[in-house]
């Protein structure tokens, strides 16, 4: 499916949360980004794959080809799928992956156990933000988290144009590695969007002028 945008469309950047998180993970300076919309996961409706979740997000928020997308962890993975479906030319990844091979093998091994241990996976991801992250987790749908553990395990990775991706990654991220081009933060972990918001926002600001140029074709 595809929502066609024209050069006159109001261009937005849609920013997705991580798995088990909400838009509340983007607070403070994040809210000063012009034309940004911080979105939550749509109500779970039986989606089993990354592609199906991307379709649900597109429908729920009316994302168009002229927009940009961004996300943390699972949100970045879904952002890549949205971009692939719509032909979006600007994607921002905060501690996210472009290939299943970048995801910690232990977590991929644990995914079949997600039916009984989703909260343990989330606790492992949270690190020093454990309390804040678990608060968001408890407001999330358990079925969605379980389904996404399986979906990520079966994800085939992003095969499209790598030049549309801008990545920022914590060097101490034990969940996802960055094997390609990205800006690395020396003391950053997996929740880079929460611990190093200013660095993530800088990536967007540095490329904001390209958002309009690259979507005008």
Image: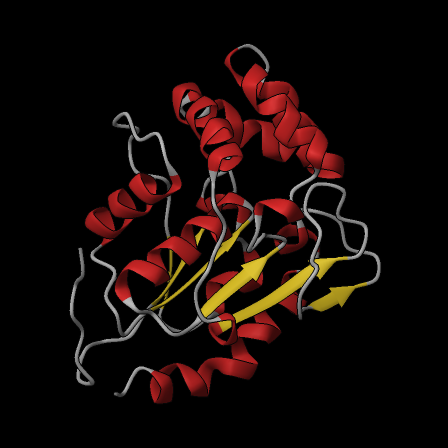
Of 203 and 28, the residue lying toward us: 203
Residue 92, compared with residue 82, is above or below; it is below
In the orientation shown, which residue stands out farthest toward the top?
116
- Residue 64 at x, y percent in the picture: 23, 66
Q: Residue at x 64, y 51 (%)?
A: 194
Taking 134 as reference, is 128 left or right?
Answer: right
Display colour scheme: secondary structure
- Residue 73 at x, y percent in the picture: 56, 47
Residue 105, compared with residue 192, is above or below; it is above
Q: Quadrant of residue 185?
A: bottom right
- Residue 145 at x, y percent in the picture: 46, 26
The number of numbered badges drawn on the structure is 0
Q: Quadrant of residue 167?
A: bottom right
Of 172 and 152, the residue lying toward us: 152
- Residue 135 at x, y percent in the picture: 55, 28
Taking 95 as reference, is 161 left or right?
Answer: left
Q: Specify whether residue 130 is in view.
A: no
Residue 104, compared with residue 177, is above or below; it is above
Quadrant assignment for the N terminus: bottom left
Q: Residue at x 51, y 28 (%)?
A: 149
Quadrant assignment for the C terminus: bottom left
Q: Specify whether residue 46 is in view.
A: yes
Q: Residue at x 25, y 27 (%)?
A: 45
């Amino acid at each position: 499916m595809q929502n066609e945008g024209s050069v006159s469309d109001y261009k937005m950047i849609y920013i997705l949360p991580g798995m088990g998180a909400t838009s509340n993970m983007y607070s403070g300076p994040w809210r000063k980004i012009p034309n940004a919309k911080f979105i939550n996961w749509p109500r779970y409706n039986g989606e089993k794959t990354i592609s199906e979740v991307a379709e649900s997000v597109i429908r729920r928020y009316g994302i168009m080809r002229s927009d940009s997308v961004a996300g943390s962890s699972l949100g970045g993975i879904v952002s890549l799928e949205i971009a692939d479906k719509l032909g979006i030319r600007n994607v921002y990844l905060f501690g996210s992956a472009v290939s299943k091979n970048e995801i910690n093998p232990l977590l991929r091994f644990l995914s079949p156990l997600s039916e009984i241990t989703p909260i343990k996976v989330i606790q492992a991801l949270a690190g020093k933000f454990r309390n804040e992250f678990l608060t968001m987790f408890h407001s999330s749908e358990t079925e969605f988290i379980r389904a996404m553990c399986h979906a990520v395990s079966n994800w085939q990775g992003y095969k499209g144009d790598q030049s549309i991706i801008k990545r920022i990654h914590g060097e101490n991220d034990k969940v996802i590695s960055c094997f390609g081009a990205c800006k690395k933060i020396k003391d950053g972990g997996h929740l880079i969007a929460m611990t190093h918001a200013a660095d993530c926002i800088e990536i967007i600001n540095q490329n904001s002028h390209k958002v309009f140029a690259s979507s005008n074709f």
